[in-house]
Image: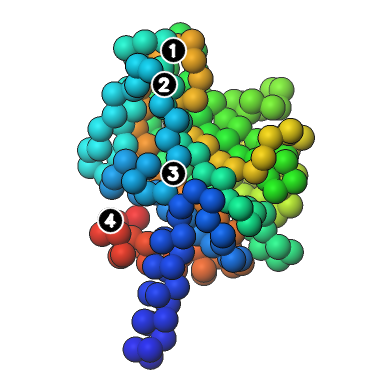
Amino acid sequence: MVRGRHWRRAMILAVLLGAVAGAVWAEPYWIAYEGNEFPENDGWLHYASSPPAQRWLENGSLFIDSRADPNITDIYGMYPTSGLDPEPGETFLMTWRLNVYEAAPWEYPGVGLRSDERYAVAFIFAEDYLWSVYEPFVLVQFTPGMFHEFELRSTDMRTYELYLDGAFAVEGAFCESLFPPGLWWGDILRGGSSFGAWDYFRFGVVPEPGTLVLMFFGAAALRGKEV
């Protein structure tokens, strides 16, 4: 039993240490940014404009304030060499917790994903709704001024289900893309300003729900933060 616990701990630690740009991952995998440090110190590539956004860490969340200049962007990306997509019987998950305090005069915080076969989905956020960049008429509203949990699930990287605070919100489709596989999130658009807090950003491939629960709590134990 003790040996089993040590083995599971070692496996979770290996997953966390694999969260580096260009990493080679075996299936399944789970990568979790938990807001305990700046993302570039946790394996993410950082794309910052000049001037840069104001950033700080507070209560386990990353705050990004780009209101000083409409041309400010602050983006975090990861581009694995061995792929993102699930195998048959597996599910790709991308989940994040975000509070958009301000986005004016338009939406600017966002997340995006491109699959191994270069199909893409991306969401842009205002204070009280999100919209799907590549899909007309796909919009999800939520209560402003508070954190919300978002989760994208896909078994084929062609279609997806989006959940808001644990409840099903919308079903959508990926769009063909010319760009390589990867993920990105942050303040991703120029021409406006925003102020938001990111509590976490996680993604991976999960063969069954029990594995996801194990990874959540294992990651929290190793990184010293409650999930």
Q: Quadrant of residue 136?
A: top right
Q: Marks 4 and 2, Cα distance to the nearest angstrom?
A: 30 Å
For the residue carrying disc 2, how many other residues have a C-alpha within 10 Å: few (<14), some (14-19), or many (20+)?
Answer: few
Residue 164 coordinates in the image, percent (x, y): 51, 40
Mark 2: which amino acid?
Answer: Ser
Earlier sequence position, callout 4 versus callout 3: 3
Q: In the rendered image, which residue does mark 1 sit on?
A: 71
For mark 4, give the secondary structure. Answer: loop
Q: Which mark is residue 48?
A: none
Q: Is residue 183 visible?
A: yes
Residues under numbered marks 1 and 3 in contact, where contact means CB atoms less than 8 Å apart: no
Residue drawn at the location 34% of the way across and 89% of the way down: 2
For the residue carrying disc 1, how many other residues have a C-alpha within 10 Å: few (<14), some (14-19), or many (20+)?
Answer: some
Residue drawn at the location 49% of the way across and 35% of the way down: 185
In this picture, residue 209 sits left or right of residue 83: left
Residues under numbered marks 2 and 1 in contact, where contact means CB atoms less than 8 Å apart: yes
| Front label number (1 vs 4) | 1
Q: Marks 4 and 3, Cα distance to the nearest angstrom?
A: 19 Å
For mark 2, give the secondary structure. Answer: loop
Number of dots carrying numbers: 4
Q: In the rendered image, which residue does mark 4 sit on?
A: 225
Q: In the rendered image, which residue does mark 3 sit on?
A: 44
For mark 1, give the secondary structure. Answer: loop
Q: Marks 2 and 1, Cα distance to the nearest angstrom?
A: 8 Å
Mark 3: which amino acid?
Answer: Trp
